[in-house]
Amino acid sequence: MATAARTAQDGPLTDLELGAWRGLLRVHARLVKALDANLEAAHGLPLSQYDVLVQVAGAPGERMRMCELADGVLLSRSGLTRLVDRMAKDGLLSRCACEDDARGSFACLTPAGKARLDEARSTHLAAVRELFLSEFTEDELTCLAGLWERVLPSCAGLDVCAGD
């Protein structure tokens, strides 16, 4: 792991490290709040539900194992279960049995869920471009995308589907 100025592993963060870390947290929190408000106002769809719809729609067969979905969204497993149950009640998703694992289940996109996603997608993407992407040049976006890919493996954690 490379850093511009390496400090002791157990020491306090430097001002530069603290600025980078806190900046990430503050920007993420504000963007999530703004994107959520935007989707709620325009479509009555919270960002958490939009995120689930995007994940499931992008999966093969428009269905995704719950454990894989939990790994892809910013919710705890129990929080995801409650959210998927609410979305199923609203007709946006359905629960489908997993043929090769009786304990596992899939979240499956319904036609109503696909329609809702299609309605909200352009609103969400426009807000992402306006609130975040427009702040960077193309070269900066290339650099930023590369930096995220460098960090991702170190925080991958355990396979959430193991033992499911």
Image (tube, rainbow, N blue to C red):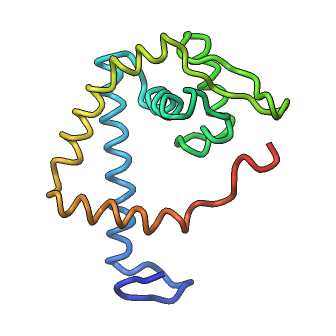
Foreground residue among 162 and 3: 162
Quadrant, the C terminus: top right
Foreground residue among 90 and 36: 90
Foreground residue among 103 and 157: 103
Q: Is residue 102 above or below residue 138?
A: above
Q: Position of residue 52 (x, y in %)?
A: 51, 31
Q: Is residue 67 above or below residue 96?
A: below
Query: Is 44 on the left or on the right of 111, as rendered?
Result: left
Query: Is 43 on the left or on the right of 62, as rendered?
Result: left
Q: Quadrant of residue 106?
A: top right
Residue at 17 percent across and 57 percent down: it is 138
Q: Position of residue 111 (x, y in %)?
A: 50, 11
Residue at 24 percent across and 58 percent down: it is 141
Residue at 67 percent across and 34 percent down: it is 66
- Count of marks, rendered view: 0
Q: Position of residue 119 (x, y in %)?
A: 33, 17
Q: Residue furthest right?
A: 102
Q: Is residue 15 above or below residue 57?
A: below
Q: Position of residue 25 (x, y in %)?
A: 39, 56
